[in-house]
Image (tube, grey):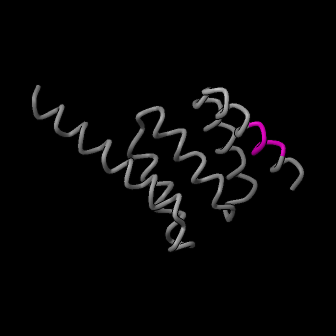
Amino acid sequence: MEKFKRLKNEGNDFAKMGEYEEAANKYSECMKLNTEECTVYTNRALCYLKLHKYEEAKRDCDHVLQTEDSNVKAFYRRALAYKGLQVRKKNMAGI
């Protein structure tokens, strides 16, 4: 559990610095240790949104909402992911 906390804090620090790829990697490492902790999924979803990886962000939010169906961060970030996917689809249609 101590390693989990350390990795999560490192991920949080990277996210605060705008290093979203590194933060997402730390959160992914956390998930290997504890798949039940929803905050690492919503945190990684935020990183994916910042990296324009909307499908991955949506997947993380969907995972959280399966266990915590009233998680506001997961709902909000999933909505942002859907919005990003729609914008991407419109841009691809114009090419």
Taking the magenta stretch, the answer to whether it contains residue 7 is yes
Residue stretch rendered in magenta on the structure = 6-10
Q: Name the residue located 73 percent from the left edge and 59 percent from the top edge.
A: 34
Looking at the rendering, which quadrant does residue 7 occupy?
top right
Q: Name the residue located 54 percent from the left edge and 64 percent from the top edge.
A: 64
Report the side of 31 relative to 54 (left or right).
Answer: right
Foreground residue among 20 and 56: 20
Image quarter of the C terminus: top left
The residue most toward the right is 2
Report the side of 45 relative to 14 (left or right).
Answer: left
Report the side of 15 relative to 64 (left or right).
Answer: right
Q: Name the residue located 50 percent from the left edge and 74 percent from the top edge.
A: 69
Q: Name the residue located 54 percent from the left edge and 38 percent from the top edge.
A: 47
- Residue 53 % position (x, y): 42, 38
Taking the magenta stretch, the answer to whether it contains residue 44 is no
The residue most toward the left is 94
Looking at the rendering, which quadrant does residue 1 occupy?
bottom right
- Residue 51 % position (x, y): 47, 32
Whether 16 is drawn above or below 80: the answer is above
Report the side of 57 relative to 7 (left or right).
Answer: left
Looking at the rendering, which quadrant does residue 29 occupy?
top right
- Residue 4 % position (x, y): 81, 50
- Name the main secondary structure of what is drawn in magenta: helix
- Give the mark count: 0
Whether 79 is drawn above or below 68: the answer is above
